[in-house]
Image (cartoon, rainbow, N blue to C red):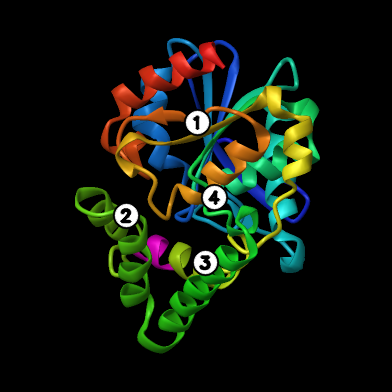
Amino acid sequence: MPTLEVPGAELHYDTFGSGPVLLLITGADGRGSVWHPLAKHLSAHHTVISYDRRGYSASHIKGTQDYTNRLNTDADDAALLIEHLSPTNTAIVVGNSSGAIVSQTLLLRHPDRVSKLISHEPPAFGALPPDFRAKGEHVINHIYNQYRTLGPITAMEEFTAGLDTGSEATLMRSLMHTSSSYEIRANSMFWFEFELRQYPCADVDVEGLVKLKEKFVPAAGEDSGMGVGVAPIAAIAGAVGREMLRLPGGHVGFMTQPEKWAAALLEGIGRY
């Protein structure tokens, strides 16, 4: 089990294939293993890295943590992984959901570590106009209150219902269903407490992304349409002046259609 010691944590990671380094950053569940089916389809073209983000699964926290600065710390962890594993000290980065928020922060804080960023459906309400941002933050706070009063299962059902319908919503609920295992229960509770409210409600440095627009690829699922889960990345894409890359499936299409997602991702990397 390869690990990397970073300040305040030990990061567990997996690698697949060979070629230019491509780093995958997970969203709410925090487990790198959700990317493994996709990684196998990318491994003929890239050295693919997936990892458990700090505090999730096998990436254990060590010592006192500054949770008020956790998003920046998450981004710094990713930069340290790239430095550790990439011969060129750079990587193509793909982030999904709150992992896309981490990846955008990585690009802004460590632009020399990122050759290209594909930001897939970040729930970044900080990029929305004030009225819409306030509505998004209200929903997030409501879901957190549901978690505290009715428990994580009810709260997760409401959260996933707002992102998607059908099989993907069912899959997302199963991924974070607290009765599945102690690991998933721990991941879910950590996410509810330290990420659900903090990451979507963080300010987005759109001006900074504009300056780095040549490295920035906004992305969304083909099946996501222009729903609530796409509004933030659509707003960022418009402000940055970049066309959105559409990838198969919805919010977690990389899990439901990994082979098609990989092919579309590789095509997009080459085109943007």
Foreground mark, 1 or 2, reads: 1
Between the residue at mark 1 and the residue at mark 2, the CA separation in whole angstroms equals 23 Å
Q: Which mark is residue 136?
A: 3
At horizontal 57% and vertical 45% (from top left) the residue drawn is 235
Q: Are marks 3 and 4 in contact (CB under 8 Å)?
A: yes
Between the residue at mark 2 and the residue at mark 3, the CA separation in whole angstroms equals 20 Å
Among the two numbered marks 4 and 2 on one chain, the one whose residue lies closer to the N terminus:
2
Q: Position of residue 149 (x, y in %)?
A: 41, 89
- Residue on which disc 1 sits: 244
In this orientation, does residue 195 appear?
A: no
- Residue on which disc 4 sits: 232
Between the residue at mark 1 and the residue at mark 4, the CA separation in whole angstroms equals 12 Å
Name the quarter where the C terminus is drawn. top right
The part of the chain drawn in magenta is 181-185
Q: Which of 107 and 233 is in front in this view?
A: 233
Amino acid under disc 3: Gly
